[in-house]
Structure formats: C-alpha cells, structure tokens
Amino acid sequence: MQILIASIELFSEKGYANTSTKEIAKKAGVAEGNIFSKYTNKRGLLDAIITPVIKSILPSAMQDLLDESMDPSNLTLDSLIRPLLKNRIIFLQENAKVLKIFISELLYDKSVVTQLLENAPAPYWTAINTTIDALKEKKLIVNWDNLEILKVIWSIIGGVVLGYLLFDQPLTKESTDHSTDALINALSI
Amino acid sequence: MQILIASIELFSEKGYANTSTKEIAKKAGVAEGNIFSKYTNKRGLLDAIITPVIKSILPSAMQDLLDESMDPSNLTLDSLIRPLLKNRIIFLQENAKVLKIFISELLYDKSVVTQLLENAPAPYWTAINTTIDALKEKKLIVNWDNLEILKVIWSIIGGVVLGYLLFDQPLTKESTDHSTDALINALSI
DNA sequence: TTTCTTTGAGTGAGCACTCAATCAATTACA
DNA sequence: TGTAATTGATTGAGTGCTCACTCAAAGAAA
C-alpha cells in the first residue's frame, strides 16, 4: 500500500520513466526488493495504478448520466448535463494524480483505449441512446448523431481536464459553472 | 535536419524517455556522436523540437482571432469563431506529432507554460479584449469575464486536440462542424 | 596543409531486477 | 507455558545491461 501511494506521488510528479524503483522504495520506506515481490516488475506497478481507473472511469461516468435520467417525464438537458459535469469535476479532483499518470500512458499506449471501452458495457450505451433520443423527441437537444453529441460533451469535459492538469487552471465555481452553461447552451436547439 | 525529423518521429511514437540516442542516430542515418555535436545533449534535441511550437502556437492562434475581427462593423460571433476553429484544426493536423511531444512535456514541466505565455505579447491581449468587448456591446456574446470566455474557447479546442491525440478520433468535417456550431451556440446569448 | 565535420568504439553511471541471508510470525510439541 | 521448527515476508548488496555522452582518429572541404 505504501509502495502504491509513493508510486502515484512520484509518477504524477516526475513521470513513470523518470522515476526509479530505488526512489519509490525510499519514499515508501521499504527495501527495493519488496516492490518486485509484490508487483513482479516496474510495469506491474504502473498497471496496479492504472487498472482501477480504467475499470471505474467510464462506468462511473455513465452511471452519472443514467442516474439523472430515471424519470423521463422530468428529463431536460439541464437536469442531465448539470449533475454530470459536477460529478465529473469532483471525480477529476479526487483522482487528479492518477488521471495524470493515466493520460501520460494513453499518449503512447493505445491498447489502454481498448481496455477503456471494454469497461463500458452495452446496456449503458443503449440506455444513453434512449435518453438522448428522448431529449430529441422533446426537441430539447440538437438533432445530431448521438455519437457526435457525446463527443461534444466529452470534448468540454476533456478541455476542463486539460486546463486543470496542463495549465493548473483552478476549478473555481465560476469556471465550472461557465463550462456547464456553455455545454447546455451548445447542445440546446 | 535528418536528426530532427527522426527524433520527432520516434519521440511522438514512443515518447522522449523511451527513445535512445542510438535509435535516433540509426533512423537518421548518422553516427551517434553527431547528435551531441549538433544539439549538446538529448535534452537539447527536445528543446529544438519544442521551442518552435512555443514560439508559434499562441501568436498564430491569436493572429487568427485578430484577422477575423478587422472590420468591427461586420463582426459577429460566427465570423470570429468559425475561421478560428478551422485554422486551429488545420494547425493541429499539420503539427500533430510535435504537439503530442509538446503536451507530454507540458505534463511534467510547468516552466513550458511560462515560456508559452511570454510568447503572447500584450498588444495581442488588448486587441482580443477589444474584440470581445465589441461583441458584448452588440449583445452577440455572453456577458462573462473575457478570460472566462477565452477559457471556454480553449476548452473546446483542447477537447478536440485531446480526442485526436488520445483516442485517434478522426477530424471529420461532421465532427469539426459540430464542435464549431457547439462553440458558437455555447457563447451566444 | 589546414580546418572543420563525422565517426563509432569506449566509458562510467544508473537502471531494473535477483537472491542468499535475515527477520517475524505462526504452528508443533512436551 | 516455554521452546523448537516451519513458513513466509523483508532486506539490500550484487549483477548484467543499457543509457547518454566522450574523444581520438578518419574523412571531407577549403
């Protein structure tokens, strides 16, 4: 556990490739050999950090989307988007360090994308399509392909993540409110 | 020159830390020592790749913004945003590999952000503020703080970049049109 | 002949990873 | 309960290897 905490700290600060197992052992207060008996190799340590993100990031986001669309009669774009963005920004703040490690990895290992998508089971996708279709029915959302709508949503969330991780842009209430308003506006008819 | 081309290729494919100078020399078709007589050290090679991006990325983006706001009487949100996003996406495609290397670097070296901002001189900022203020005057844009408006613009562009670099999302006409429409919608009153 | 460039074997440093030895906890037995 | 035996976890010096970088020698250009 100490090893994992130390690794997250160091990887997110200096990057995976620039962190030695010796440093990790020192920070964790254990002998270097311990790392290898528990995680087989350095890569195993990275996997132990990233796998939980892969397993939780998409399912939890999709759950957010669905939680807000339980009652179709009260469904509006606002009631869908606002809690979604709020939850995603909370998730981002809680997992900032691990997400940073994850994104670094994503840049040079495309197999992670596949793993990511495998963790978003079909039932979620159909439920989300149903929700978006319901909004289209009510003329509350632009009449684009559902995938294109989702891309715009993820684009804005991605932009917030990028600003936070790359430029240390603080997630003030003003900023996140504006991102939310902008997204709702963007998809309204 | 061959060395630089080989470096960009390898760094963007495998990452800076995972590329050895030996590999670069082999790909470039020169002896390893050549790299060090021309670029001092491996880091010098990275700088030679990144510096041009730093020097051009913000100025060229801001020039795009200003080119479209020459004639204040014809200024609309659409005439401002549409060419801007188009130019940024062209820039992204032309410089995808270098931008990828740049973003990797940005994640773990915050001094790059400072350099980036130093290359956006004050005249640009005032001109952009004037443009946004003019749109506010005409009630063609939301009445937020100008910085907040710029953040939303960059958020969308960042989201497109992220989708392209991280998830290999193709930049189809449909996608980029939707991003553009969404952004214009997002900032309209 | 002189000056500048290119070469690649060589070098020390640092890396991930190993493993025999040590330590700690648990069980076996009188 | 006290002690010996067994098992499993922890240690860190040691190992082989790869890395960035050097430099004397060879080659090319002037």
Image (spheres, coloured by chain):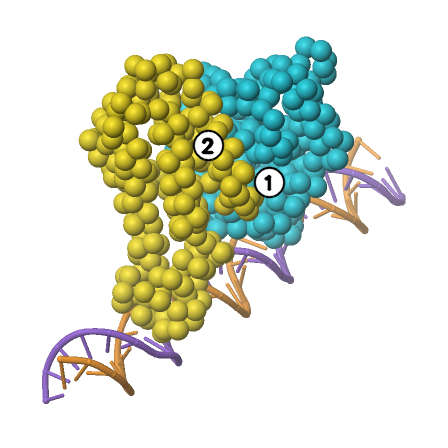
Chain colours: A cyan, B yellow, C purple, D orange
Amino acid on which disc 2 is placed: Thr
Above or below residue B27? Residue D24 is below
Q: Position of residue D6 (x, y in %)?
A: 81, 50
Chain for disc number 1: A
Viewer-nearest of labels 1 and 2? 2
Q: Quadrant of residue A178?
A: top left
Label 2, on which residue? B180
* Residue furthest top as drawn: A74
Seen in the image, is A9 located left or right of residue B58? Answer: right
| Residue plotted at (70% across, 36% down) | A120
**Which of B176/A111 is in front?**
B176
Looking at the picture, tell me which residue is in the foreground, B181 or A23. B181
Residue beneath label 1, please? Answer: A49
Residue A13 falls in image quadrant: top left
**Residue placed most toward the observer, A16 or D14:** A16
Identity, as a three-letter code, of the amino acid under mark 1 = Ile
